[in-house]
Image (cartoon, helix red, strand yellow):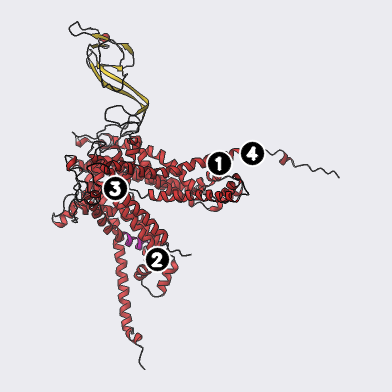
Amino acid sequence: MTMPAALQRDDANDQAAKAGRRKLISRWFYLLCIAIAMLSVLVLAVLLISISVQGGSRLSVDLLTNAHSELHPEQAGMWPAIVGTLFVCGVCALVALPLGVGTAVFLEEFKPRRPELRVLRRWIPLGQRRWDGVCTGLYKAMRGLHGFVQLNISNLAGVPSIVYGLLGLSVFVYMFNVFGQITVNESAGLELAGVRHYYQVLTLQRGEVVLIPQQDLQQATITVTEPVEAMLPSGERVTLSLWKPGTEKPTEPELRRRTVREGATGGRYSQKDWYYFRLPLGRSFLAAGLTLALVILPVVIIASQEALRGVPPSMREASLGLGATTWQTTRNVCLPAALPGILTGSILSMGRAIGEAAPILVVLGAAIAKNSGPQHLMDDAVTMPVLIYNWAGRQQQVYQELAAAAIIVLLVILLLVNSLAIYLRQRLRQT
Amino acid sequence: MTGTITQPTALTKRRFKSTAWASVSERLVLVGLGSCAVATLLITVGILVMLVTQSWHFFASEYVEFGEFFSGGRWTALQAKEIEDARFGIWPLLSGTLRVTVIAMVIALPLGLMTAIYLSEFASRRVRSLLKPTLEVIAGIPTVVLGFFAILVISPGLQWISGGSFDTFNATSAGIAVGILCLPMVCSLSEDALQAVPTSLREGAYGLGCTPFETATKVVVPAALSGIVSAFLLAFSRAIGETMVVALAAGTRATATLDPREQSQTMTGFIVEMIKSESEFGTVQYYSLYGVAMALFVITFAMTVVGQMVRRRYRESYQ
């Protein structure tokens, strides 16, 4: 009796050899997997070590307290950038978090259900068949809106951040030039509050000026030919007296302080309060914060939705069954239960906002010559990632080291923010 | 018998709270939350309006030809001194973007997928507790930091290995850095997809005598393929839109070549250079920003939509 061909081909020895080979392949695959997985740990280690080696020597108090300096790079620091990041991210959080959580609540808790259809049927006269169709159509449109918003958010999450930067440039910085084009060193646009325009004229007292209120905003300079009302820098209102060249100069300082040469010219000068506000927003930290809010909004929404989905339906149903309205249920049951998740997601997205450079670079420009934080609402700002980008792009060794040191500071801040998120999550879970 | 029934005192003295305010506030809240949701729609509308109106200024200009924009091989918006000499053909920027992105994908896709397979199929609890935080930390590193890493370590490393045939700024170093950036994203999305495959499929494969390698590659990965492909597409779209790494490490010369050792300006890199040059508002060069941004948006948007469609359409559900 002969063995069938199929069995002959797979005799025992052959089978054993094949199994051995298969096991060997599997073993090698396993080892390859471990090696590749450990590669990411290796990359992280190389990154952290190389940056610490490059920047370690520049970590000093100077770095934290000074401003950027072209002339003395050894003493350059990042204090304005730290303050600027704080302001920009503050605006971003104030806008993105309420808007994001609100949208998530709308999408998760206020889904149109059958009762809405019943309400619609009551509002619109019953008994007529064609109205019934309209009711169902409206109801479907409401459901459609939900689905469309959801789809839109997942698409927004995929838009590159630099496109948001350009959106911020058009919408917040220039506002499509609806309020006129803004130019450097000129007051333009629709100024709503907190600014007074003057001309600045030198007086006879050396180094002191008087301020003459500006009447016509288009006129760039003034020539003093007659005594006018003016203001001393201290705020005191005076009438200017004129001195004709050739006559004798007044001697007492009080009089010299409010006397100007006849024919003296003065340039424009604006006093801005902290609440100075105008449209369009221009290259201000406010515009940067709003732009950044657009970037992280999808992240906040998606994280909050996940957190709300994690609330057990039984809790929601219990509250609704006791007669609470949807909003009462949301406020008293769902939001408190989802709070740890929402907080964690929000803080993590703020971490992303702190490190985001591209949109801010587009909105505020790449200039870093600023030695303080923003002074008023329309002031520009420097942020840490933009400063790092600028320093890293320079050839000199000293700026390369400064960039590495600034990166260490940035990473430490991000680490603190993320640990705060983890701590809050643990803490809120326990209570 | 007296026929009157008195109500208990608790019920007669009970003060009913009006629900009128609750139903009014319900509607107010609904309007408020609904307007939040509509605001997110407005962002999309804003992006579209901004891109169309601003790039209209660009395409309507007499120095720009619509056909040349898509087919032209020279892009000299920043180099040309006179507007008459400037050429606006997107190919150099597009090919620069593709070079960097392809290198990034060559790095991120296999490594990310292998790491995901390891995490979901083989890793012990202790290894997971080391590897997952590492990947989360890499995902949280600001992109500008990775750009700095590319010019600090990767580019000198490549020059050292190749004996100096790489430019100081080159597509490869930027591509590797973008790959590192995309790796955690590929890994976590693929891992989610792999973990959604039911254990019974794996047990079936083992029961038939498969080795772990065969189970992973012939059963689990095909079952999770839609999730993995959508992860790949999302990572691709992320890599195309990546800005700070290429602005720092990929250089500023826009050339249409295939040589990964040369400088390659990408679309995002051009936008950053244009912003840095502080070009006069309203010039054709300024509006060319929006032409490039339009191309960028269309490509990434298509990628995202296809990625979501793949995930929805080809999702295998195991109930």
Q: Which residue is mark 3?
A: B143
Dot 4 falls on a residue whose secondary structure is loop
Q: Residue at 19% x, 55% y: name it.
A: B260
Amino acid type assigned to the residue bearing label 3 in the image: Thr
Of residues A169 and A359, the one nearer the viewer is A169
Residue B294, given in percent of the width and then of the height, sits at 30, 47
Q: Which residue is mark 4?
A: B17
What is the magenta range?
B112-120
Residues under numbered marks 1 and 2 in contact, where contact means CB atoms less than 8 Å apart: no
Q: Quadrant of residue B125?
A: bottom left
Q: Earlier in the sequence, mark 4 or mark 2?
A: 4
Q: Which residue is mark 1?
A: B26
Answer left or right for A56 relative to A168. left
Q: Earlier in the sequence, mark 4 or mark 1?
A: 4
In the image, residue A9 above or below residue B113 = below
Q: Which residue is mark 2?
A: B223
Amino acid type assigned to the residue bearing label 2 in the image: Ala
Residue A24 appears in the picture as rendered: yes
